[in-house]
Amino acid sequence: MSIDIRHVSKQFGQFQALRDVSLQIESGELVALLGPSGCGKTTLLRIIAGLETPDVGHILYSGLDTTDTHVRERQVGFVFQHYALFRHMTVFENVAFGLRVKPRAVRPSAAQIREKVHALLELVQLAGLADRYPSQLSGGQRQRIALARALAVEPKVLLLDEPFGALDAKVRKELRRWLRRLHDELHVTSIFVTHDQEEALEVADRVVLMHQGKVEQVGTPQQVWDHPASPFVYGFLGDANQFHGHAHAGQMALGGISLPAPDYAQAQHAPAVAFVRPHELSVHRPGSGVEGMAVRLERALVVGPIARLELIPTDGSAADAAKTGRAQHITPIEAHLPADAFHAQGFAHGDMLIVAPKKARVFLTQD
């Protein structure tokens, strides 16, 4: 089932949760709504489900306007962060619940229910736990049962609200890989809400970046990572150093070096910010012949194959570029390099170094 969201807005009191949101989700897609708390992603999910009504706009399921259709009639399955399992019911009874409360005319027989529940427990790899109670399961097992229960009624749309948010990091990673494999098998149109960028990029076919009630960017994980459409997207997806300065005639001066800014060939001394990811910085000793920003190595953390360096700008132009906030606090520059390269260079705390961007993305700012 495809979903077409057209010009949806929603306000709660003085808070504008959604602002003219339009989005198309193809049948069989797995889409992530990604963004910080308060960006509107859960409100949008609830409107798609029918749990909230938009102030303005329409929701279409496969071309049919369902904006005013009751949630019970939308054939939607839900999975929530905190499982919402019935504690007094066994695993089997939890999964069977949606089937047993169907109207008598469409309710499966007891034998059909038993067969379907056992098939679903096989699907979520928990076939031997049918007689247990939720309190006897791990968090990851409970969330799989919640998903089996949602799938039991054969929903045309599956909605997941922070489904792995209550789990520890290792279990989350295992479950999101499992969810991706399950979706590839079932092809149910699915939308999940998350604030975890790694989760969204690993699981989803497409990612919808949301900020302050608006859609900032929509694209495949690779598209939004490689080509962020705005400073918000760049900053939200992974770590990024920000350097402030001015763009002029397609270039941005940064700490004594010049960065290309081809999108702004017509800019005339316009305020700008350059984003550089930590792995896009090269680090050298003075006298190496590399032009860059003068920095001091403040701290090095070597974990596994990566060395994470905190570098403090020491020359005036570099320090100005790294300043943030009203207090003009100098933010350390973060650089990542292979641990073996770090050890080979013999970098140590307090060393004066040169850091140079290998790649940068420049945006004009309003300041």
Image: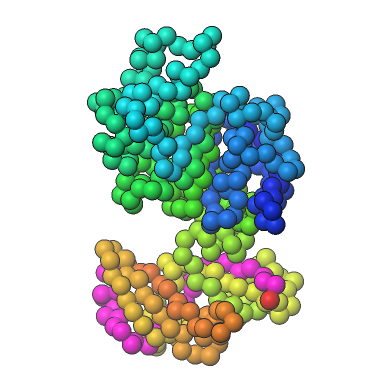
Query: Going 53% across and 14% down the picture, which residue do you hit?
Result: 103
Vertical arrangement, residue 325 with respect to residue 340, above or below: below
Q: Give the image's coloring scheme.
A: rainbow
Image x and y of residue 131, in percent: 26, 25
Q: Residue at left 31%, top 34%? A: 134
Residue 219 is situated, as x and y percent measured from the top left of the image, at: 58, 47
Left or right: residue 10 versus residue 34 is right
Q: Nearer the viewer, residue 30 or 125?
A: 125
Camera-side residue: 87 or 193?
Answer: 87
Q: Which residues are magenta?
A: 339-366
Q: Quadrant of residue 327?
A: bottom right
Q: Which residue: 70% across, 57% down?
A: 14
Q: Is residue 220 visible?
A: no
- Position of 123 relative to 261 (above/below): above
Residue 38 seen in render:
yes
Residue 201: image x %, image y %?
Answer: 47, 49
* Left or right of 109, for residue 132: left
Relative to 334, residue 189 above or below:
above
Q: Quadrant of the C terminus?
A: bottom right
Q: Is residue 264 above or below residue 190?
A: below
